[in-house]
Structure formats: structure tokens, C-alpha cells
Image (cartoon, rainbow, N blue to C red):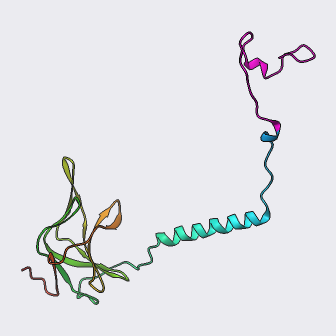
Amino acid sequence: MMRENGKRSGRDKLVPPGRPFIVRWPAREALERPAAPSPALRVASAFLLSALAVLLCSSCTGGRHFQVVAEGPARNGPQYVVLTKEAQVATLHFPPGLYRLYAVDDRGLYYTAPGEILEHTSGSSIRLKGGVYVSKRQSAVRPYVYRAGTLTHVGKLKRGTYEFQDEPSIP
């Protein structure tokens, strides 16, 4: 398109001469900067972001007071858990044997496995560390594994596959 002074405008330099090509540019109003948010919106968004940050930081700390215990008798539960037969949760296989008290938290006790837990994948097996978690009321006995540096609870054990003991004897 030619201007009144006979020169081509900057937009027309993009279109090759002689070709029907339409270039649509947004209206000037659409290119203008939007109005600044109101002070109330700024305060509300700052509050929401700070609340989100607090929630994220508090969830990372755990809040269950996980502590590894020293050798000695258990204070709040049995010293040992015995798996009488191999327990399987999905593709994880927990070996039978004597599981020793390892750690406590506010809700229960952690017992470490006598050997490695095997996770069967297609074509191979992965060896993991783990054990059994027992709630303080002994209402739930759940296996756990360490995966990528994080303790992860997996499934539940069926009744009759485990026993609680205070002395290290295997039936």
C-alpha cells in the first residue's frame, strides 16, 4: 500500500509485490498495556501466595517426628515383627523373617526387613530397602520401601502373615 507521499509503508514491505496477501494487525487498543490491578487485588494475591508458600513448606517438614531408635527394648510396642511367609504387595516382594525395630514417629513404629525387598519389573528385579510399619494401636500393618530417598507406604499386610514378638525367636 502506498502512502500519500508515494512511499511504501513498513507493513507493505513484508508482502511481496504482486501477490494477494492480507496482513491483519491487531487494533491499537489491544496492544496497549492493561490497567494496573487494584490494591485490594494485590493484597488478596499476596495473601494467597504466602498461604501457598506456608502450606508447601509445612508439608515438607513431615510433622510426624520421625526418629531412628537406638538398640534396646521398644517403648511403645513389640520389639520384633515376624513375617511367617513372603508378603507381596503389587510387584514388591517382602521376605519372610524377623523384622527389627528401626524407628518411631507420632503414629507408629517402623521395622526394617531382614533382607532387601525385590520389585519385579519387566525383565529384571530392583532391590530396595524397606520394612513394615505398625500403627501404635496395631490396627494397620503396612509395608514400606525407600524409593528415591523417600519413605513410601505401600498397601497393607493380610492378617495371619505376621506376628508380634518381644523376643527374637522365629517360629
Q: Position of residue 81 (x, y in %)?
A: 18, 79
Residue for point 51% across, 72% down: 58
> Looking at the figure, which quarter contains the N terminus?
top right
Q: Nearer the viewer, residue 37 or 113?
A: 37
Residue for point 90% across, 13% down: 6
Q: Quadrant of residue 135?
A: bottom left
Q: Position of residue 157 (x, y in %)?
A: 22, 73
- Magenta span of residues: 1-28
Above/below status of 36 relative to 131: above
Relative placement, left or right, of 43 versus 150 is right
Relative placement, left or right, of 51 versus 78 is right
Q: Quadrant of residue 75?
A: bottom left
Above/below status of 79 relative to 87: below
Residue 39 inside the magenta-drawn segment: no
Residue for point 23% across, 88% down: 73
> Looking at the figure, which quarter contains the C terminus?
bottom left
Relative placement, left or right, of 85 versus 126 is left
Report the predominant secondary structure element of the magenta stretch: loop
Q: Nearer the viewer, residue 72 or 45?
A: 45
Q: Position of residue 112 (x, y in %)?
A: 23, 73
